[in-house]
Amino acid sequence: MTFPTTTPTTDTERVLGQIERGEIRCGRDAAREIAAQHQEAYGNAVWPDSAWANAVAALNGGAAR
C-alpha cells in the first residue's frame, strides 16, 4: 500500500496562500479597521495617549471618548 507524499510548505508560503484565498487580511486598510473596532469596543483605555486615540477615532469618523 502506498500513501501520497506531501511536501511541507514554509510559513511564508502558507501565509501568502491564506492571503490569496482571502482567509486573512493584511495591509493598512485592514489595520485601520481593526484599530477603529478596538477603539470603539474598549475606548481610549487601550491607547497609550490621547493623540493616538483621536487619530484612530478620526479614521472611524468619530471623536475619541
Image (cartoon, helix red, strand yellow):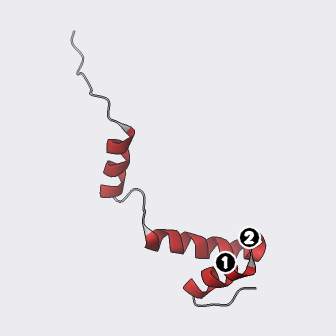
Please give the name of the residue rendered at 52% of the width and 74% of the height, measured from the top-left corner: 32
Q: Assign a secondary structure to mark 2.
A: loop
Q: Position of residue 35 (x, y in %)?
A: 59, 71
Please give the name of the residue rendered at 39% of the width and 40% of the height, measured from the top-left corner: 11
Q: Position of residue 5 (x, y in %)?
A: 24, 22
Q: CA distance from mark 1 to mark 2?
A: 7 Å
Q: Amino acid at mark 1?
A: Trp
Name above or below for residue 20 compared with residue 13: below
Report which residue position mark 1 lands on.
52
Q: Position of residue 40 (x, y in %)?
A: 67, 78
Name above or below for residue 53 compared with residue 21: below
Report which residue position mark 2 lands on.
48
Circles 1 and 2 in contact, beta carbons < 8 Å: yes
Residue density around tag 2, few if under 14, some if 14–19, many if 20 or more, within 10 Å: few
Q: Assign a secondary structure to mark 1.
A: helix
Please give the name of the residue rendered at 60% of the width and 87% of the height, measured from the top-left corner: 58
The C terminus sits in image quarter? bottom right
